[in-house]
Amino acid sequence: MPGGGPMIMMERDDKVSMELTDEVFKSMEVGLAFRDYNGRISSMDFHRTASYLVTASDDESIRLYDVQNALCLKTINSKKYGVDLVSFTDHPATVIYSSKNGWDESLRLLSLNDNKYLRYFKGHHDRVVSLSLCPRKEYFISGSLDWTCLLWDQRAEKAQGLLRAQGRPAVSYDDQGLVFAIAFGGRIRLFDSRKYEKGPFDIFPVGGFDSETHVVKFSNDGRLMLLTSKDGHVHVLDSFRGNVISTYNVKPVISKGTLEASFSPDGMYVVSGSGDGSVYAWNIRSGKVACWASTDTEPPLIKWAPGSLINLHHIPVTLFSKFGIPCAALPSLCSVFWYP
């Protein structure tokens, strides 16, 4: 892997917040695109507090972006292991990523400053399809096609716990790190992260037993959850009562891609990809707000930059744009960022 590159130390500047509205959504357009990929973008993640975005690609690369100054800071190649999912830890200079070589399903803790592996996490026997880091502690959860969910401590190589699924699992911590969700087989199971061995404290039915779950997420305030499935459904639920508030329908996923969706920072909107490559936005209260069509045949990845709804820097163009707008990684081998 290449060495050198800038040390990663930047923190977010102060921002001015502004309400996100339907009109703001309808005015969004692509503000910036990076087209330096030689393969499909498989995963991306914004750091919670520092102005960075990290992406993983089928070209076996990990790319780090300064989202404040619209710069690609470095490219790290993982030719031996490949790379599929990638997530920041609390520290903006380290990431955890999963393999994509078909013979080693270990997760790896990587330093972006000096391109060194800090730890290997071995335990899965098939591809890792879901990864969630605890926002308050050094714990994380991984879900695999081997139908297991493993609980990890970043400071230890061995898994700290194992929970079995009965299908492809999706995993997610809430924003406080007190609760995590495991979804599969038309059910979302909620666990107390401090005593998960006792089993789920609540189970919510959603979708159907035969529906393959792709993503489960909490809103920032923990009041809502969303779940996406391969058959093109995006469900929004009350995370306390479990009732389905809204269900949005997009084109089913016929490829090996993942139907990704994300809440806006205020929890009032959902943005989602679609099996036909389009991007949709919904007001949770009133329904569809906007659609950006595409000729691609795979669902784009969608991530929303954390923090304020509006980001007024003196830089004319920023990666997550003037309004903290989502980033989409399109199947056409580029990442794009919207602004009104």
Image: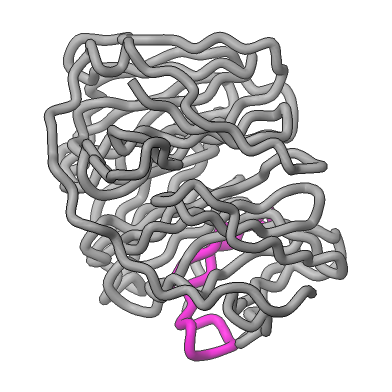
Residue 251 relative to residue 116: left or right = left
Q: Is residue 147 magenta?
A: yes
Residue 75 relative to residue 21: left or right = right
Q: Quadrant of residue 333?
A: top right
225 vs 120, nearest the viewer = 120
Q: Is residue 99 magenta?
A: no
Q: Quadrant of residue 5?
A: bottom right
Residue at the image point whose x is 50% and y is 43% from the top: 184
Q: What residue span does the magenta drawing correspond to? A: 140-160
Residue at the image point whose x is 35% and y is 63% from the top: 50
Q: Position of residue 238 (x, y in %)?
A: 19, 34
Residue at the image point whose x is 85% and y is 59% from the top: 102
**The C terminus, quarter of image:** top left
Q: Is residue 76 above or below residue 55?
A: below
Q: Position of residue 94 (x, y in %)?
A: 52, 75
95 vs 250, nearest the viewer = 95
Residue 226 seen by the camera:
no
Q: Position of residue 172 (x, y in %)?
A: 40, 54
120 vs 66, nearest the viewer = 66
| Total count of labels | 0
Residue at the limit of the structure toward the bottom, as seen here: 156
